[in-house]
């Protein structure tokens, strides 16, 4: 979850690697004459105000500092906290003599104001909030020895942890845990959002996220080329054009959904309803004759066609604006033949679930389709293990796109979208683990197909669909993540898509 606080900025959509944030710092300091110590003072002040806003009753802070500038921020927080009358224990990891430049100045200011520095042995229990100022974006190798002990001890405490800039141990670029990493209750990040907060283990470790640009001029940012964009429904909702007053159902896209082998009709039914709830004008389910007759009794707005053989798809395809294939398709002859029939049609196509596994068996390149694999399907498509996919999801989605063409959507916590264009890939870090439930991917498939059918291009439909799906999942999770089912996501689509979720 992300929030904004009185003294923080809205979360920007631009994400950066550590090296790029270093460049932003340097530009602000060298070209805009903002002294580094001024930035550090601002960073410490923002972090302290966040802490006060978030935990107003906190009286006792324990601040862990490292030997770099992240530690320097910790010293600023410590000085401000003491000045505000709080009790501060400052535990230094590594030799304080190694503090250099602005961090050394901040340490001195803290000491001159009467603050004391202790070595970090055991963590005091009498603490209302812990502040993690051990490593920020300067972490360069695995966390070991006393640093690892401190991180593990922090994670074992009951009191909340505020991470300064990055949870220590989390790699700024990959979101990988380098040995161990702090699990923060909240992170306040400065100048540029590090992409590692949004990919890999970032979402698991960062807690609620706050951001401040530290008032550096907007032009500083124009020089850095983004490597990743954050997307969310607030930003994407504008991509859904309002319906014309004189719209008729033929204007809103006819979605043809193909799948539902015997025993798996539910997947297609969910995708179909999700397509309707995302504004598709007409939705036809092409499914196995075994259940075709009763499938639309459960949702009469859906049209259902019994498809015995691939030839039966012909007239259905002719009427469709977009096809989605895969939910419940199975990998038997029936599903295989339908996939082979649809694969090369040249119509806008969304490929999901079993169709992705069939694609993996016989890889082909499709210039304009949308592929929506979860990590298991992505592993099959790239012939690697799921672990390899999860270790570098950004690279995985890049290779998926390169090898299979079109727009690749790698689902999971922090869904990634790559359309192979010059534009940087996108990450949606909304959504929640309640969505890890049968059929929630089928819902996404129906939604993306519906948006494509309403005239959006592949990348736009995938991006808006992923963001709407995540926002609907978060809305549904207000009643609890445990026990959330795919139909709950569908039920949330209409209020979210129309911006009336507060009603
Ligand atoms: N002008 C700036 O550069 C600003 C920097 N700020 C802060 O400065 C941070 C970056 O500072 P630094 O570049 O000094 O980096 P960090 O303070 O994040 O970390 C670097 C320090 O940690 C040590 N280190 C790295 N990996 C280690 C490991 N695995 N085990 C033990 N020691 C390790 C390094 O030797 C160095 O002393 C930011 O994250 C932010 O908190 C803010 O004050 C805002 C302004
Ligand atoms: N922990 C999570 N955080 C955010 N989104 C999640 C999480 N777990 C699952 N999701 C989302 O839920 C959907 C699950 O899709 P998928 O695995 O294909 O499910 P199914 O095959 O059962 O339909 C994806 O869109 C995924 O991004
Ligand atoms: K930190």
Image (cartoon, rainbow, N blue to C red):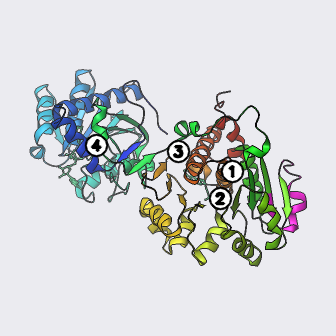
Tag 1 residue: 453
Q: Is residue 192 above or below residue 414?
A: above
Q: CA distance from mark 1 to mark 2?
A: 8 Å
Tag 4 residue: 223
Name which quarter of the figure residue 495 lies in.
top right
Q: Decide which of tag 2 and tag 4 comes sooner along the chain.
A: 4
Dot in front, 3 or 1: 1
Ligand 2 positioned in quadrant: bottom right
Q: CA distance from mark 2 to mark 4?
A: 37 Å
Q: Whole-percent x and y of residue 155?
A: 37, 48
Q: Relative to the observer, which residue lies in front, 8 or 316? A: 316
Element under label 2? loop
The tag on residue 348 is 2
The reply to whether the magenta stretch includes residue 82 is no
Element under label 3? loop
Please rate how many residues cluster around mark 4, counting C-alpha atoms within 10 Å: few if below 14, some from 14 to 19, many from 20. Answer: few
For residue 181, say whether it is visible. Answer: yes
Magenta extent: 285-301
Q: Is mark 1 within 8 Å of ligand 2?
A: no
Element under label 1? helix
Q: Decide which of tag 3 and tag 2 comes sooner along the chain.
A: 2
Circles 2 and 4: CB atoms closer than 8 Å = no
Q: Is mark 3 within 8 Å of ligand 2?
A: yes
Q: Whole-percent x and y of residue 180?
A: 34, 56
Circles 4 and 3: CB atoms closer than 8 Å = no
Q: CA distance from mark 3 to mark 2?
A: 27 Å
């Amino acid at each position: 979850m992300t929030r904004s606080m009185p003294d923080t900025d809205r979360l920007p959509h631009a994400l950066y690697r550590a090296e790029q944030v270093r460049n932003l710092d340097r530009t602000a300091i060298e070209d805009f004459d903002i002294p580094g110590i001024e930035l550090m003072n601002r960073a410490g002040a923002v972090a302290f105000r966040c802490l006060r806003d978030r935990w107003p009753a906190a009286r006792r802070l324990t601040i862990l500092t490292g030997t770099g500038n992240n530690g320097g921020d910790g010293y600023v927080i410590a000085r401000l906290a003491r000045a505000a009358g709080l009790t501060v224990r400052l535990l230094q990891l590594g030799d304080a003599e190694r503090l250099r430049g602005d961090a050394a100045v901040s340490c001195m200011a803290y000491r001159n104001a009467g603050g004391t520095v202790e070595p970090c042995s055991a963590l005091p229990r009498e603490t209302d909030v812990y502040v993690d100022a051990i490593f920020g974006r300067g972490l360069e190798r695995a966390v070991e020895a006393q640093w690892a002990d401190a991180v593990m001890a922090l994670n074992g405490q009951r009191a909340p942890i505020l991470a300064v800039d990055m949870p220590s141990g989390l790699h700024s670029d990959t979101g990988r845990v380098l040995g161990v990493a702090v699990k923060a209750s909240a992170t306040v990040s400065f100048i540029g959002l590090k992409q590692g907060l949004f990919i890999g283990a970032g979402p698991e470790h960062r807690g609620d996220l706050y951001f401040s640009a530290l008032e550096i001029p907007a032009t500083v940012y124009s020089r850095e080329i983004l490597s990743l964009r954050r997307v969310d429904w607030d930003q994407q909702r504008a991509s859904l054009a309002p319906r014309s007053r004189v719209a008729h159902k033929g204007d809103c896209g006819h979605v043809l959904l193909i799948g539902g082998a015997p025993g798996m009709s539910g997947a297609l039914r969910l995708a179909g309803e999700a397509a309707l709830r995302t504004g598709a004008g007409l939705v036809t389910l092409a499914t196995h004759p075994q259940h075709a007759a009763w499938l639309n009794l459960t949702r009469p707005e859906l049209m259902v066609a019994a498809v015995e053989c691939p030839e039966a798809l012909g007239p259905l395809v002719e009427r469709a604006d977009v096809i989605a294939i895969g939910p419940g398709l199975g990998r038997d002859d029936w599903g295989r033949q339908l996939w082979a029939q649809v694969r090369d049609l040249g119509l806008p196509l969304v490929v999901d679930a079993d169709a992705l596994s069939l694609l993996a068996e016989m890889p082909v390149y499709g210039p304009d389709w949308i592929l929506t694999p979860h990590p298991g399907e992505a592993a099959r498509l790239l012939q690697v293990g799921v672990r390899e996919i999860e270790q570098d999801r950004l690279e995985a989605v890049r290779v998926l796109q390169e090898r299979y063409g079109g727009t690749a959507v790698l689902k999971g916590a922090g869904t990634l979208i790559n359309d192979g264009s010059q534009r940087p890939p996108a990450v949606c870090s909304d959504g929640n683990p309640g969505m890890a439930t049968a059929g929630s991917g089928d819902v996404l498939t129906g939604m993306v197909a519906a948006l494509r059918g309403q005239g959006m291009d592949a990348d736009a439909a995938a991006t808006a669909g992923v963001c709407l799906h995540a926002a609907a999942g978060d809305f549904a999770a207000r009643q609890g993540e445990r026990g959330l089912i795919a139909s709950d996501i569908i039920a949330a689509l209409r209020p979210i898509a129309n911006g009336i979720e507060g009603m």
